[in-house]
Image (cartoon, helix red, strand yellow):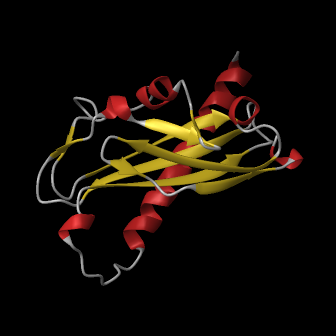
Amino acid sequence: MWAQNRRNIVRVAVLMLSLALVIFIAQKAPAKKTTSSKSCRGLHAGIRAQVMGPNIETPNVALSFTLLNDSDASIDVKAGSWKIVVDGTELKDSDYLLGNGPHPVGGYRVLNPGESYEFGIALPIVQYFLPNGEHNVSWRGAGFESSTIGVAITPASH
């Protein structure tokens, strides 16, 4: 029992440290000077992936998500519309996957101007990323869609 709990604690700690590193790097990145237009304002989504394995009980892909409101108005993020897309197919259990874990007080509802949500999940490789090879991952919802990123799964990944 203790070994199982220890593995779960390690798994959560690694995921949280990965997410903290992503946030730290994003905050330290120099701001790019761009001219924004009103057509580019609104919700913007980011996604990042890290293969976690094979030295953990359930090798997985840790996904980190960011959703930013860069408009001048508050926007309902419509969390129920969020979908994770792997290799062009929306995951049928996206609601379950994105609905579990830590949430802001009151849930994901409205982002005020300049605010963002940042969170992460872990998807088991054997359930979502087989066969081995390059997999394309993104997420989308009402009013936003992230870029598509590649996740390389090799036999050494799991």
Q: Nearer the viewer, residue 36 or 69?
A: 36
Residue lying at 73% horizontally and 31% vertically, measured from the top left: 58
Which image quadrant: the C terminus?
top right
Which residue is the extreme one toward the bottom? 33
Q: Is residue 60 left or right of residue 101?
A: right
Can residue 103 be seen at all in this image of the molecule? no
Q: How many marks?
A: 0
Which residue is the extreme one toward the top? 1
Q: Is residue 47 left or right of residue 14?
A: left
Q: Nearer the viewer, residue 156 or 46?
A: 46
Vertical side of 123 occupied by 32: above or below: below
Q: Is residue 23 left or right of residue 136?
A: left
Q: Nearer the viewer, residue 146 or 24?
A: 146
Residue 143 placed where, x, y %?
A: 30, 46
Which residue is the extreme one toward the right? 155
Residue lying at 24% horizontally and 32% vertically, measured from the top left: 105
Residue 51 placed where, x, y %?
A: 69, 48
State the image quarter where residue 86 is shown: top right
Can residue 92 be seen at all in this image of the molecule? yes
Which image quadrant: the N terminus?
top right
Residue 19 placed where, x, y %?
A: 50, 51
